[in-house]
């Protein structure tokens, strides 16, 4: 066995040993690896301050760009780190300040699609190469990250506050103007209406309504709430009663070269759209439509990859007919499933009860290792059965993290994808969002 040592603070920890130790201690080590590697991609030396490169990879693929989506999700993890620490908080605070200044600059720089521009060069200006644009999720994600930050801001800092509010207001205006319009999905593939995009737009409107209400701007808050109700009505239309899951898109453009592409409309983006709604998700994590969708995704991916044969918890990709870099499982989507199970468990603990329905029965039975349940059965979380569901949910979350642990590189590094047959990291190396998605999942590990 090869021993690889990674340097963490003042102790050397053999990574291979960490990988074979308890999940708990691996999480602690992987957390440090993720923070370190994530920060290498935030304001790298040759970029404008505040830029978050998606990955240092320059070719196959070239990811040295600042995507608003990736950057906002990454910076949200910096907010979490800021919120939880005191030791490093200067470092986190200055990264967040830079992100806000950069965002203000980018909002004012010319671009073909206004704030619907998905990515910027590392010098801060908008990308002009042919690309899947517009994409409308970025501003919504940035609103949520910045509101999350403003709520955590430890010292009164009016400078930061007013700069962040300017960014938020411009993003809100853009969301209000555009949420009804078709755009490219977060995977940058086809134009249409997308659950992911509208789910994060909804959450952005709600969190802003709440924030501006607390801030005393009642009229604005009411306007935002009204708008969010309309988005919610649109979101309700994605549930596919016949297929039994929430569909990813509506009015999707057809790909000429493959008219059946994405025909199942089953896509992990639905789960991401709920997770990325922070505390203002369109659905409760106990909603049976969410459970139905999660279950359908797991079943679909179980059949998909060689590395998923003969295992009980499976590696997750974007959608099953994905062909990008061979169509593999991704770290962000597998980590998202860990986060999902932890959050369902937390919601169950908080709400105290659930009812077995035709939509959630298969999901819940799988959580109980195929024990049979009956429709209409109400299960309190404090009962023996309820406690077994809670521990089953936690175990599932752990199992997804164990998959991540199995397929990270020899020093804990995460690329964009891991090979469906060989399980080795592929496509963009050190994908910033992969580290952020792992940190997002462990925020809910307890
Ligand atoms: C690059 C995008 O970033 C990726 O998500 C997509 O799958 C490919 N282009 C193909 O459209
Ligand atoms: C491709 C992904 O599909 C997209 O969501 C992401 O923004 C870019 N890669 C950059 O990581």
Image: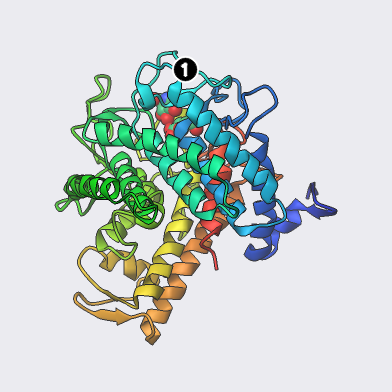
Residue 419 seen by the camera: yes
Q: Is residue 351 left or right of residue 420?
A: left
In the rendering, at what x and y percent does residue 140 appear?
A: 37, 39
Task: From the top left corner, tell me how far across and down residue 177 is, in percent.
Answer: 25, 32
- Image quadrant where one finds the C terminus: bottom right
Protein image colouring:
rainbow
As drawn, 61 above or below 348: above
Ligand 1 in which quarter: top left
Give the side of residue 78 with respect to residue 328, left or right: right
Q: What residue is rendered at 33% in x and 24% in y? A: 134
- Is any part of residue 326 visible from this angle? no
Above or below, 342 against 111 in this view is below
Mark 1 — residue?
Answer: 127
Viewer-proximal residue, 42 or 286?
A: 42
On the image, which quarter does residue 410 sit in?
A: top right
Q: Secondary structure at mark 1?
A: loop
Q: Position of residue 304 (x, y in %)?
A: 39, 44
The answer to whether the beta carbon of the residue marked 1 is less than 8 Å from any atom of ligand 2 is: no
Give the number of callouts.
Answer: 1
Q: Position of residue 288 (x, y in %)?
A: 26, 63
Residue ranking furthest to the bottom: 383
- Is 221 rendered above or below residue 103? below
Of residue 234 and residue 288, the one placed in the foreground of this image is 234
Outermost residue toward the top? Answer: 129
Q: Give the class, few, some or many, for how many residues have Cα within 10 Å of label 1's Cα (few <14, many ≥20).
A: some
Q: Is residue 60 left or right of residue 389?
A: right
């Amino acid at each position: 066995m090869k021993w690889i040592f990674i340097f963490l603070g003042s102790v050397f920890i053999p990574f291979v040993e960490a990988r074979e130790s308890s999940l708990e201690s691996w999480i602690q080590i992987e957390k440090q690896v993720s923070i370190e590697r994530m920060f290498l991609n935030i304001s790298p030396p040759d970029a404008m301050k505040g830029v978050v490169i998606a990955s240092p990879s320059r070719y196959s693929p070239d990811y040295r760009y600042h995507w608003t989506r990736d950057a906002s999700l990454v910076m949200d993890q910096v907010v979490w780190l800021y919120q939880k620490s005191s030791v490093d908080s200067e470092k986190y605070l200055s990264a967040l300040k830079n992100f806000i200044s950069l965002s203000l600059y980018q909002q004012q720089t010319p671009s073909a699609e206004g704030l619907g521009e998905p990515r910027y060069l590392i010098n801060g200006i908008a990308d002009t190469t042919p690309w899947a644009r517009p994409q409308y999720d970025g501003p919504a994600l940035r609103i949520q990250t910045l509101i999350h930050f403003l709520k955590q801001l430890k010292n009164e800092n009016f400078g930061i506050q007013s700069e962040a509010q300017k960014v938020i207001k411009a993003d809100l205006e853009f969301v209000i103007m555009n949420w009804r319009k078709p755009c490219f999905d977060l995977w940058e593939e086809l134009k249409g209406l997308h659950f992911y995009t509208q789910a994060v737009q909804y959450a952005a409107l709600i969190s802003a309504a709440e924030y501006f209400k607390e801030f005393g701007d009642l009229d604005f808050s009411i306007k935002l709430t009204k708008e969010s109700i309309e988005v919610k009505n649109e979101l309700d239309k994605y549930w596919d009663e016949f297929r039994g899951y929430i569909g990813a898109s509506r009015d999707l453009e057809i790909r000429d070269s493959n008219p059946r592409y994405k025909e199942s409309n089953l896509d992990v983006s639905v789960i991401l759209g709920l997770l990325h709604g922070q505390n203002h998700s369109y659905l409760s994590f106990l909603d049976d439509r969410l459970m139905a969708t999660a279950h359908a995704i797991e079943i679909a991916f179980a059949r998909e990859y060689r590395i998923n044969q003969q295992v009980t918890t499976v590696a997750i990709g974007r959608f099953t007919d994905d062909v990008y870099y061979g169509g593999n499982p991704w770290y962000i989507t597998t980590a998202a499933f860990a986060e999902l199970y932890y959050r369902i468990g937390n919601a169950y603990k908080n709400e105290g009860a659930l009812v077995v329905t035709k939509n959630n029965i298969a999901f819940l039975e799988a959580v109980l290792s195929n024990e049979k349940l009956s429709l209409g059965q109400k299960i309190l979380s404090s009962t023996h059965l309820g406690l077994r569901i809670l521990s089953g949910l936690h175990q599932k979350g752990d199992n997804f993290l164990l998959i991540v642990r199995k397929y990270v590189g020899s020093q804990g590094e995460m690329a964009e994808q891991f090979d469906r047959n060989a399980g080795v990291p592929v496509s963009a190396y050190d994908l910033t969002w992969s580290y952020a998605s792992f940190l997002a999942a462990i925020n809910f590990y307890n």
